[in-house]
Amino acid sequence: MDVPGKQRPTMADVAEKAGVSRALVSIVFRHQPGASQETRERVLKVADEIGYRPDSAARLLARGRSRTLGVMFTVHQPFHADLVEGIYPEAERLGYDVLLSATAEGRGETKAVEALLSHRCEAAILLGPDAAPAELDALGQRTVTVSVGRRVPLARIDSVHTAEGKGIRQAMDHLVELGHRHIVHIDGGRGPGSAERRRAYRAAMRRHGLESELRVVPGDHTEASGIETGDLLLAERERGRPLPTAVLAGNDRCAMGLLMALTRAGVEVPRDISVVGYDDSHLSHLMPIGLTTVRQDAVLMAEYAVRFAVERLENEKLDPREAVLEPKLVVRGTSGPPRGA
Amino acid sequence: MDVPGKQRPTMADVAEKAGVSRALVSIVFRHQPGASQETRERVLKVADEIGYRPDSAARLLARGRSRTLGVMFTVHQPFHADLVEGIYPEAERLGYDVLLSATAEGRGETKAVEALLSHRCEAAILLGPDAAPAELDALGQRTVTVSVGRRVPLARIDSVHTAEGKGIRQAMDHLVELGHRHIVHIDGGRGPGSAERRRAYRAAMRRHGLESELRVVPGDHTEASGIETGDLLLAERERGRPLPTAVLAGNDRCAMGLLMALTRAGVEVPRDISVVGYDDSHLSHLMPIGLTTVRQDAVLMAEYAVRFAVERLENEKLDPREAVLEPKLVVRGTSGPPRGA
DNA sequence: TACTCCCACTAGAGCGCGCTAGTAGAGCGC
DNA sequence: GCGCTCTACTAGCGCGCTCTAGTGGGAGTA
């Protein structure tokens, strides 16, 4: 049990109780050479007894470096959750600590990043940042910065993302091969990767000679957006306009919303309409038939992000780098041949 | 732009450039009396120019207290996201900083809490902790600890949760009033609140004279669990056992999984079967018809948790407290009268 | 003038640690 | 004996900040 004296024990306490100097305790706790095995064990035993726990604030102050990576994420994004899960182990492997800072209502990106910086993070890993390139560039001048999921060609920072274009192309080829011609895209608005996805969708439609069918419905990367689009399409059907035979959603969340709206109205997927998502987040496994989607490998992205940050920290002046990962179409149950085929 | 000299500017730099002492800069940044308005502005201006940012590690070391609350959460729980969103503003209001530490695969609760402690958090707010009461009790001896969403009567720590029993009772009364008799409960396993929910379900069934229909399907608080149960019920129907007319899921995620499985099989909700969730997380608004569920007010819970932590920090030895919030049934589209009615 | 009071400001001692420079002692070769 | 190396350990400064105990000087009072 702890001393009732409240005060959290310090190295000096351990040192005294173990009959050694403070410096030696420090050596032991840093796993540095310079202490005998016997002493090590004694020190650790004493430390455990009095409940000593190194104070990272002091540690961080004393050594110049904090060896801490800051991660900004959005609390409601399942894909961010996947990324965070990947970041922890890789950071630990490289001997870095991780600090999370969430954006939320009333807590914008600026605030979240400020928090990271004031906690002396050596690098900021931003998951799907929404800030303007100029701001990111400025941040990049201040500290090592990595953007995950969003390309920021205008800022001199590292970034990790998938080859959005390729992913969309694969999805489109898949749909067209199945016989679809009337394929609608739900746009992701300002969401990371949206611009590239939209562009690739347009290109694919043209390449397949389907310009006349091209249609982009405005939206964003939320379930609500999918529901809205679903309701829109259903309402249009009421008025005589047939449903498209396939929808390429902005991401999985959007696809899920769409599926809800459609299934609810008795539309059968994929018999009546095919739906393709993007991300391959946990969501996509939810349905028994599974969501056809484009996989972004969260773990790999996380590893790249951490490695970029660490390498830049240890190497000072590299040029900004960009990791472009290969996306991969994962065909599951929500895509099939169109009704007529 | 920053000095190319790399070094992050310190108070001393600001002091020198502004022609004042370090102490005065400190006063200005702490918004303490003792500096003229004029000087304040000059100091802040200089600080901004050279990009000074207080170093919270040093600050934290220097003043005895860190004024930081640590929050342990699970990265994939939407309800935790809601809670985190509520914690930030309340903590800020009370002048506390927030540090997040996620549990994830390969990063258990112990590790997550260790991280918080070594960062000198003064309190640990645990969202849906899974640890044994004895462990929580031990933690509570070490540091101010609040358990959110889970009662821990055996540990001397504060806790915030809803009156699970009341919530379930409301839901059950609602279903019975609608005419349901054959109501199945999907259990939440070791999830927070599960035991109380299960118990309340049993009690309600008995109270309504439905013991013979009582059925608890084992599960947990994930979508997968809902899907499994859905498939199970559907398979049973194949073998001649009729579907229950209503299902009380362990939480919203589970309810969503169940809905997926059922809807997919052509079962209409609520015509063929009613489904009730628990939490009223973001998920419940997803479907156009909305999920009938029991609301736990995340914002209120978050506020209580923060306040408990802070009050205990500022008051030393209070007795462990327990906030039991009133749950509230939110009737939306997934519940209705059973088929025969 | 001499006194007090207050305001704006400063000096300097830590906070708990990391780290460099150093020491004491043992072992070894010659 | 001497010098050398190696291991096991210690002294003490400094990281960037907070905070207590001051200092100096101008206004107010008698």
Image (spheres, coloured by chain):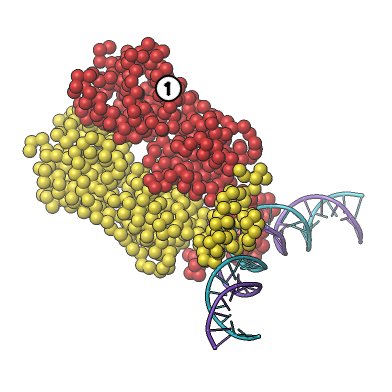
Chain colours: A yellow, B red, C purple, D cyan
Residue at point 45% right, 57% down?
A: A96
Whether residue A34 appears in this view of the structure is yes
* Residue bearing mark 1: B199
Residue at point 14% right, 39% down?
A: A336
Of B272 and B24, which appears nearest the observer? B272
Q: Residue furthest left?
A: A341
Q: Quadrant of the C terminus of chain A?
A: top left
Q: Quadrant of the N terminus of chain A?
A: top right
How far across and how far down the image is residue B50, in percent? 54, 63
Of B182 and A297, which appears nearest the observer? B182
Q: Residues within 10 Å of mark 1 (few under 14, many from 20)?
A: few
How far across and how far down the image is residue B58, in percent? 58, 57
Is residue B295 positioned above or below B2 on the image? above
| Residue type indicated by callout 1 | Arg
Residue B294, quarter of the rendered image: top left
Residue at point 35% right, 46% down?
A: A82
Q: Which secondary structure, mark 1?
A: helix
